[in-house]
Image: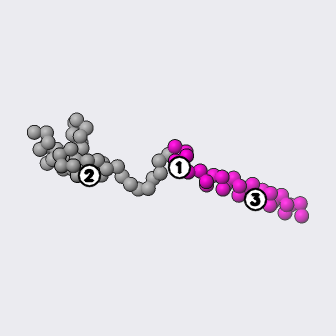
Amino acid sequence: MKLLFWALVVLAVLWLLRSKKSTGTPAAAGAAPDNGAETMVQCAHCGVHVPASESILAASGAAYCTEEHRLRHAS
C-alpha cells in the first residue's frame, strides 16, 4: 500500500511539472513563433512585395524583385 501511495505522489509531481512546462508561451520566453512565414521586402522600383530569399539586393541595401528592375533603378 505504501508503494502505491509513493508511486501516485511521484506521478502527480511529474504531471504538475509537465503541465507547467507546456503552459509557457514562446513570446513569454522571448522567442518569436515559427509559423513558416517568411519576411517580405518591397521592390524599390515597382513596389511589389517579394520574399526576402528571392529578392535581389543592391550595394545600397535596396531590394528588387528582378535584376532588370535593379538595373533600371540604378540608371
Q: Look at the image and name its color scheme.
A: one colour
Residue tagged 3: 11
Please provide the residue range marked out in magenta: 1-30
Which amino acid is tagged 2?
His
Main secondary-structure element of the magenta-colored stretch = helix
Say which residue appears at 80% left-offset and 61% top-offset: 8
CA gap between label 2 and label 1 equals 28 Å
Q: Please say whether residue 23 is one of the residues in the magenta stretch.
A: yes
Which amino acid is tagged 3?
Leu
- 3 and 2 marks in contact (CB < 8 Å): no
What is the x, y in percent for residue 59?
A: 22, 36
Say which residue appears at 47% left-offset and 47% top-offset: 32
Residue tagged 2: 49
- Crowding around mark 1 (Cα neighbors within 10 Å: few <14, some 14 to 19, many 20+) is few
Question: Where is 36 relative to 70, above or below?
Answer: below
- Which quarter of the figure has residue 2? bottom right
CA gap between label 1 and label 3 equals 26 Å
* Nearer to me, 7 or 60: 60
